[in-house]
Image (tube, helix red, strand yellow):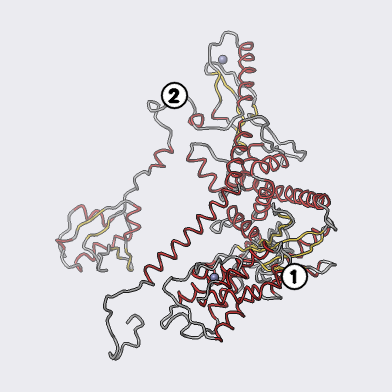
Amino acid sequence: MPKLKNKYKHLRGVGFQNLNNCNTRLGKGPSVVDVKYVRLSEASFNSRIHKHGSVLTFKDVDGSDTHHKPLRPSADKPSYIDRYGCKPRRSARRSDVHPDLLTNKLYEPAKVVKMFNIEFKRHMSLKQNCKGNLQIDGSASRKWGLCWQERLKCSNCSYVSAYYKLYEELNSKGRGRKAARANVGFQIGLTTTSIGNAGARRILNHANIISPSKAGMQGQSNSVCESLKVANEHNLRSVRRALVTENTMVGQKNPNMINVEGDCCYNNPLFNVDATPFQAGTIATATLVENNSRHKRIVGVHVASKLCLVASRLRASGKHVVCPNHRGICTANMAENESIGQEGKYYSSIANSLKSDDIGLANFTSDGDSKGYVEISKTQTNPVGHFKDLRHLGNSMRRAINKAPFSKNMLGPKSKVNLRSRFALSIKSRCMSELKAAHKAHNSDLSKIRQSMPDVVDTIVLCFKGYCGANCKKYSHVCPGNFRQAKNYLPSIVRIKMTSSDELVLKRCINMVLGHDNLSLTKLLTTTQKCEAVNRSYTAVTPKSVTFSRNASGRIHGQVLKLNNGYGNSAVIKTCALGAPITPGSQIIRQLKATDKELRASYRTHALTKRKLARAATRARKFKMHEQIHYKTGVSDPKPDFRGIHGLKDHNYS
Ligand SMILES: [Zn+2]
Ligand SMILES: [Zn+2]
Ligand SMILES: [Zn+2]
């Protein structure tokens, strides 16, 4: 064994226990000369060290041990946050004030002025000879969410004032400290965004503002969301009453009957599909929207939730819990083993609440799923009409054409899948525009439309076969007979060769939309587009990336209130309903008005038409671009011929 330096001898006796063995094993290494001792900082040491038995080594990239030996780690360098944590040195301080008073705090200016005026006078009268200044006592500030209670102290004498609440309080009658209006308003504002309390705290801290405590914010948002739900339910009732009044005024036979459209949306976290054999969704929102007016106001909403924090905590500790019938607060209104996709149940719960306001349903428009309709018609005494959503129906037809048994050569000898779908898309758009134009031409008289449709269907088939002309001019509502309509999404070089069976197949497909019986399914040309737009706006307040297990329902109700009343109005309604009104006549009201004006401008008819045209142009351009790449005529580059080479069958890419 080589002779050790005194330093290493000393190391044997003291210090890092794991390393004590190192010395005895030094001889085993490849060469003593290569050995070098290194002292890393604690963080680097922990991330680099490799322990095998009692030997500590570092690893090379090839997995072998390096010859460098670790010494006991040194302390980590203080991080930025640690250095900021200690008080700045007296020389570095901006002044002698408390550091909290150099952050940004939320005070009501009028109350600050009042506090100083009162205390100046009191200080002068009590300490007549004192030349000191009054300042806020930063070390004794009392935080109340975003708001503060402050007292003043004298910089010279021992004068200390009483505490002043520098915020407006809620007029609540309950016991305990009253909530500050700013905190309530802040939470109402948060529910209109996708940001939760954690996000809000981050924003505040970055703006050098002391954020409220986590628990305090959570408690406040819980109570705000409860109240929002109540406020919205109240508002929905007035929306329904206004609807009935309007129905009476326009002379409806039965003013209590309304047409509705319904849709349901889920918060399916798709990445979770292998975590549960049940449907992955945990929150479902069903919405009913009236179809009597063009406003399409929301008349009812039902939020079904399986999320319950209390239950999941209890289950984790081995207890058997069934939501929603357990002790404590349960935020779920469904059991864990229930299906989340019971649209019918949700719709009928909404229909029942409409019934309590004496409102009956005349017609119900939904997408492909008919379960909802069955359940909803059970709740009504009168027979309910069932309409299909135009767009869903069109898409069903498109899919049917995609799968239909057309002859092989109909779209040319080597027709691609893409060509088939282009064909289906062209037929779909043609049928939809024919349907809408027919409604316009016959003033939605169903018997007249029914009479004219068989000719229209024949014409469409002829037009796509390439015989566009006199027939189109005579029967079609959209094709003037110039060969353009049939080529909507079809490449210009494609010639369609239909056999007689192809014609029959195509007619059957078209009859899904334009057939005699199916025309009644779209009698009022209703869609569920409004519902889908509503669903999209729900995701704005309950994004998939954040789980609002407690407050999803309140957030959705808040959003419904906004959709029914507009942004500015809803802000006033919500804040007033929760007792934290926005100051009348202030700049805030003007700002709300300005935002409303901007939103309204984007919904004006000409703006909508402009956007619609722009979308259509983009779509046409993309199809044209794709056509130029994939359906080029006269491509003369030679292609390799792989025929006759054996053993290529396994490779699809050959
Ligand atoms: Zn003084
Ligand atoms: Zn529960
Ligand atoms: Zn034509």
Q: Does ligand 1 reach within 8 Å of label 2's beta carbon?
A: no
| Number of numbered discs overlaid on the protein picture | 2
Q: Which residue is mark 1?
A: 447
Residue 189 in which image quadrant: top right
Q: Is residue 624 above or below residue 161?
A: below
Residue 169 falls left or right of residue 39: right
Residue 421 coordinates in the image, percent (x, y): 49, 74
Q: Is residue 473 above or below residue 244?
A: below
Q: Is residue 332 above or below residue 576?
A: below
Q: Which residue corresponds to the image point at 35% horizontal and 86% vertical from the top-left?
A: 650
Q: Nearer the viewer, residue 370 or 447?
A: 447
Name the mark nearer the viewer: 2 or 1.
1
Residue 87 coordinates in the image, percent (x, y): 43, 33
Q: Which residue is mark 2?
A: 95
Residue 265 coordinates in the image, percent (x, y): 63, 63
**Amino acid beneath label 2:** Ser
Residue 596 in which image quadrant: top right
Q: Nearer the viewer, residue 402 or 181?
A: 402
**What secondary structure is marked by label 2?**
loop
Check the picture and name the quadrant holding the N terminus.
Answer: bottom left
Check the picture and name the quadrant holding the C terminus.
Answer: bottom left
Q: Does ligand 3 reach within 8 Å of label 1's beta carbon?
A: no
Q: Is residue 537 above or below residue 272?
A: above
**What secondary structure is marked by label 1?**
helix
Q: Residues within 10 Å of mark 1 (few under 14, many from 20)?
A: few
Q: Nearer the viewer, residue 574 or 214?
A: 574
**Amino acid beneath label 1:** Ser
